[in-house]
Image: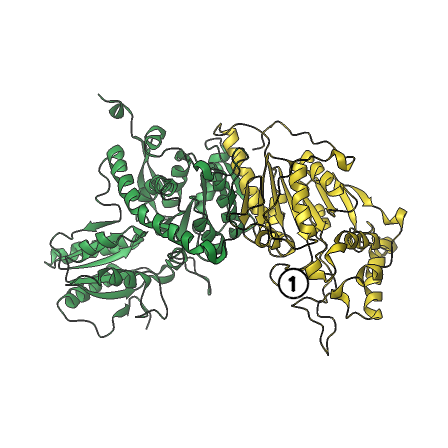
Amino acid sequence: MTVAEQVSIWDREELLTGCQAVSHAVKLADVDVIAAYPIRPYTEVMDMLSKLIADGKLDAEYIIADSEHSQFEIVKHASSVGARAFAGSSGTGWMYGFEALVVTATDRLPPLFLVGNRALDDPGAFGVEHNDAMSLRDMGWLMCWASTAQEALEHVFIGYRVAEDKTVRMPMALAMDGAFLTHSQHMVQVPTEESVKRFLPPFDLGERRLHPDKPVSIAPQVNEDWVMELRRQNWEAARRARGVIKQAYEEFNEIFGQRYDNPYFSEFMTDDAEAVLIGIGAVKMPTQTACRRMREQGHKVGYVNLRWFRPFPTEELRACLGRFKGVGVIDRDFAHGSPDNGGILMHEVRSCLYPLRERPNVINYMGGLGGRDISIEECIKMYEATLAAGRGDMPEELVTWTGLRE
Amino acid sequence: MAMQLPVIDYEHIKKAKDAPLEEFYTSGHRTCQGCESALVMRDFAKASGPRTIATGATGCMYVANTSYQTTPWIIPWMHTQLGAGGSSAVGMAAGLRALMRKGKIPKEKINVINFSGDLGGADMGLSGVSGALQTDYDLLIILYDNESAANTDIQATGLTTYGAQTTFTPPGSVRRIMQARWKKNVAPMLAVGHPTCRYVATASATFPALDFMNKTRKALNTGGPTFIHTFDPCPKGWDFHPGYSRELGELGIRSGIFPLYEILDGKVKYTYDPHKKGRIPVRDYLVKQGRFAHLIDEDIDYIQGMVDTMWEEWELPGIAPIKSGLEMANA
């Protein structure tokens, strides 16, 4: 028996919400500094973490900040002295701290943030929309969506692993659909400390760490002299992240069993599919159920669940979606005034597919905004329209609002 | 969770020749001639020494101070956002404490000092400074106050003196006074509202000599979250010859418009006491600055009246605008 086999991988299995699963992962990742500020729905993760600290089960500095801006600046600066740091937010809270989020990326610091996706005000809505997290899509962040509590837990380890890699050093946003994932319970396998340690090395910021032993100045004024070169370095890091992500998942699979076929997305019943829907997050549940029902009636449809949004898996997704005739993109977000007035994901997917000589026909669904349910019946209609689009019968309007009260 | 650490026992500097020779803020900055804020930088770095990490909020002491490849900082330094002075210090102090407690870096005393300008420390960043002063971390926040957004084009802030001309408050043919706000009273507000903050002081880099360096050391010796508000005459923003920066600071303090004191564990000590030394007329301070050239006697009398009230009617003269509870007593 090898040493690896002697180490037990899973500690236990228990019923956990998405937020609870992330809190267990933060503890297992040996996080040093946590900054909290309340906003639904991400906030449950802080309820859990504060109790773990109060009970002596987690050794970390825990700061209740005066705002999201301070919360994010606290973890950014904790990261700058070499501490593994964690924060999170939702909706308008995320936007309140936006300035701090931008500089965390340009400072090339790798804390991990949980985004419990929530609609932006006004008017108030607690439910999920992806625009909060997506606002960061151009800023040099790693962005990943979990679609189950188990995935959320595992992507805390994968997230820190990729973010902290010395060739990457980008902050990581781990997003989860508010309510549907943050607050619904799943059976979750929780790994042992030993197995997490095998996968996730200690954070080492190297010579960039702020410490009197080796003084450095971080983020002095550069103006037009250097800012382009620095932007280019961010760009290169985002490119290198692809290789690091691939390697991280290989090692993750090696330690924890074959859990991910590819890092960036999962495919459901796509093998011989003619048309697929693609979406992000919890919409996976009704779409996959609808997919099964369509299959029972002989329709060749499948579902692609996109996990990584930044870096965008261009090559992989092109190879995957290029096999189909019709692609229906489901956006739980909006991009008002964009080329087709559709969703962010649709524009990204279509741009990704454009270089193909033979492209699938792409149509767009916007739905589930503000946390509205996307029903199985709606998904069936989407499949039917996507099949038709694949056969050349394009809808009159490229973008359809589904589940909209007329 | 607080943690016992070795302390750096700073000595009180009695004479200029006793000040450390080593400089930790040196050449490379591009601050103006006569810049008192640059002296604040130099003095806090000298007083606190090499086991210090500094964060600087956006402001002239970022923009004019720290250009890539010519950094003046010998100690580790990091930029932080305009409204993040307090939270930057909290983040670093928390990170260091966690890493030391968990044995990831050696246990030793490392000072964390943030400096923020009047926009950063007193306007946009006030909430974060307040948050920092509620913690139990060892950190010092220095509000360097030159009474304007001095790098950006001399715009009025919440700390600009009443009546001053700035690019946001130009005197006009109909309105003479565009800066009609009275200077925000930051240090006492923080001292009164934050029981965890044991030491709050106001200071000038050059008057009285060595006072600011000793206040920096006192703050660090006191420990926990501490706060110093410095009064920094700015030749560019206040419109006077750079040779008179020190004099302007002295005049401001002697006129009583900028009170000089420290509050340690609730005990107030005036470090320039107008009760004993008297106050010169505010006019002597105002007329030496171009930013007040448009004021007429009436305006100067108004400012003098406000300063007189501070010192003659306030329960805690020059500090807290509470007048004796006469109405309560008579009720």
Tag 1's secondary structure? loop
- Tell me if A383 is positioned left or right of A331 in this view: left
- Tell me if A277 is positioned left or right of B10 in this view: left
Residue B279: x and y in percent read 87, 54
Residue A156 vertical position relative to residue B148 in the rendered view, above or below: above
Rendered residue at 22%/38% (across/down): A258
Residue B226 visible in the snapshot: no
Q: Quadrant of the C terminus of chain A?
A: bottom left
Residue A308: x and y in percent read 30, 50
Residue at numbered disc 1 = B154
Apparent colour of chain B: yellow
What chain does mark 1 sit on? B
Quarter occupied by residue A17: top left
Amino acid at the residue labelled 1: Ile
* Chain given the colour green: A
Q: Quadrant of the N terminus of chain A?
A: top left
